[in-house]
Image (cartoon, rainbow, N blue to C red):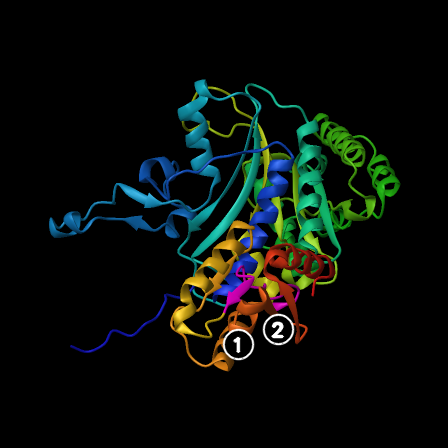
């Protein structure tokens, strides 16, 4: 029987162990910060009913959904749309979750969710079909204060500060400001506004000329003067807290929705500062619109200052009614999403993230098979002391055991030979420093803890 070629489909990220550890550490950092701000974890099934996921038929989303069909259904020759599908984001499952458990939840409901999602993306470099999303949302019942919109950037700042990936900026805007500005230009049709917002959102990616040509071209047909006013408006950026407030003030007054958006943005900026986010890390950017139409107010995007080519590493915003397709209750909310898989891949490509150290800290070598019980006892002593330890169970030359530890990323190797057993000591070799020392058996755990703590503190 011929062998099947071992391969993975395009668009998945499969990592070697040390990279997997680094990815897990990223997820742990994100989770720790979400919990620090009082968000509670939930998980939803990877598979949902198709009619729940696809509440609006057709469109780009449905063309990217993976349907799930059992072998039994295939054998029956069923050709209708499958009953089940893989989730394509975490927002739709959240909407279903809140609607289903509405009477058991406390509002405002603060949840975080870190799970894989699935999309039929076209295979290309850096695009993933299976990837982790790390979301937070605050859901209100009937209403939700604008102050929660300011808390979200504080969480974002905390996450990316702890990830230590260099300087970054949290960009803010409010779609009410954009809508009100369009109204002032005579663009009052909501669908036309939404289309214009999508084009404006492409400004940083596609450039001024592209957006201008689109707005004045077929489909929009705006005058050159109107397009110029829009482009001048959306290129407004702030530099510092006082400058952000001054630029909002300079926009003056407009329609009711415009004035409401300015007031909300001003309050959010004031609260962000009160939450301790340094003014070097947030700014207004009036081109940020977010492509999804359900955003109604505050919107966010986060970029790395020194690596703009990476694009947004975190985005989100305010929406008026999360679960309108599943419940008559009004459930406004605000949230953000970090695409952790894509972020990790991008950071690794940009050499902003290093391969992690092994979670195994110590390898106990085997000098003499007859002494295996002593080696196992020593390993148990280390594990009981909270040190992750592996034991060589099948022997071999000592040099080969050392090479194994080095290749596996294990920093400390412990040698317990006949001389050490006679003296009640253990020899410890630090493969990173290429140094070794002898320590009394009773002091081994304490000594290694000190060594590990120093190595962690000095990042060596």
Which residue is depicted at the point 18% across and 51% down? 71
Q: Which quadrant of the rendered structure holds the N terminus?
A: bottom left
- Horizontally, is 215 left or right of 236 in the view? left
Q: What element carries label 1?
A: helix
Query: x, y (%) of residue 386?
Result: 55, 50
Query: x, y (%) of residue 351?
Result: 65, 68
Label 1 to label 2: alpha-carbon separation: 8 Å
Pointer 2 residue: 431
State whether residue 213 appears in this view: no
Which residue is depicted at the point 47% across and 41% down? 90
State whether residue 158 appears in this view: yes
- Horizontally, is 78 left or right of 441 in the view? left
From what the image shows, is residue 14 above or below residue 187?
A: below
Pointer 1 residue: 402
Image: magenta residue range: 349-364
Does the segment drawn in magenta span residue 245? no
Does the segment drawn in magenta span residue 351? yes
Query: Which residue in the rendered view is the most extreme toward the left?
Result: 76
Q: How crowded is mark 1: few (under 14 residues within 10 Å), some or many (20 or more)?
A: some
Contact? badges 1 and 2 (CB < 8 Å):
yes
Query: x, y (%) of residue 219?
Result: 55, 50
Query: x, y (%) of residue 221?
Result: 62, 49
Q: Which of 53 and 147 is in front in this view?
A: 147
Disc with the residue nearer the chain's start (1 vs 2): 1
For the stretch drawn in magenta, the main secondary structure is: loop
Which residue is depicted at the point 54% across and 20% down? 141
């Amino acid at each position: 029987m011929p062998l099947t070629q071992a391969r993975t489909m395009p668009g998945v990220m499969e990592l070697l162990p040390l990279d997997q550890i680094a990815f897990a550490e990223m997820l742990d950092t994100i989770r720790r910060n979400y919990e620090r701000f009082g968000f509670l974890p939930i998980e939803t099934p990877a598979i949902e009913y198709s009619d729940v996921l696809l509440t609006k038929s057709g469109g780009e989303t449905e063309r990217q959904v993976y349907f799930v069909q059992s072998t039994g259904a295939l054998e029956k020759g069923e050709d209708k749309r499958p009953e089940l599908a893989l989730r394509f984001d975490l927002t739709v499952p959240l909407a279903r979750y809140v609607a289903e458990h509405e009477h058991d939840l406390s509002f405002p409901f603060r949840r975080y969710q870190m799970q894989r999602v699935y999309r039929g993306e076209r295979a290309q470099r850096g695009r993933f079909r299976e990837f982790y999303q790390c979301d937070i949302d605050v859901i209100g019942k009937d209403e939700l204060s604008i102050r929660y919109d300011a808390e979200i950037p504080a969480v974002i700042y905390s996450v990316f500060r702890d990830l230590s990936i260099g300087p970054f900026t949290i960009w803010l805007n409010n779609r009410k400001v954009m809508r009100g500005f369009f109204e002032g230009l005579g663009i009052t049709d909501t669908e036309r506004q939404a289309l214009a917002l999508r084009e404006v959102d492409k400004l940083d990616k596609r450039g001024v000329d592209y957006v201008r040509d689109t707005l004045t071209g077929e489909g929009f047909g705006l005058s050159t003067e109107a397009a110029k006013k829009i482009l001048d408006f959306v290129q407004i950026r702030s530099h510092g807290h006082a400058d952000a407030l001054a630029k909002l003030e300079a926009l003056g007054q407009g329609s009711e929705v415009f004035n409401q958006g300015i007031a909300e943005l001003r309050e959010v900026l004031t609260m962000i500062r009160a939450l301790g986010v340094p003014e070097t890390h947030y700014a207004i950017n009036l081109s940020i619109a977010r492509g999804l139409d359900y955003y109604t107010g505050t919107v966010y995007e986060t970029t790395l200052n020194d690596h703009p080519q990476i694009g947004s590493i975190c985005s989100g915003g305010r929406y008026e009614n999360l679960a309108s397709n599943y419940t008559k209750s009004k459930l406004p909310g605000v949230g953000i999403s970090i695409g952790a898989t894509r972020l990790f891949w991008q950071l690794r490509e940009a050499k902003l993230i290093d391969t992690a150290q092994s979670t195994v800290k110590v390898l106990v070598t085997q000098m003499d098979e007859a002494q295996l019980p002593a080696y196992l006892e020593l390993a148990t002593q280390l594990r009981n002391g909270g040190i992750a330890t592996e034991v060589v169970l099948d022997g071999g030359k000592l040099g080969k055991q050392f090479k194994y530890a080095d290749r596996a990323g294990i920093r400390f190797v412990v040698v317990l030979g006949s001389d050490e057993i006679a003296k009640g000591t253990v020899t410890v070799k630090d493969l990173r420093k290429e140094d070794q020392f002898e320590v009394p058996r009773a002091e081994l755990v304490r000594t290694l803890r000190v060594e590990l703590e120093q190595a962690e503190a000095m990042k060596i």
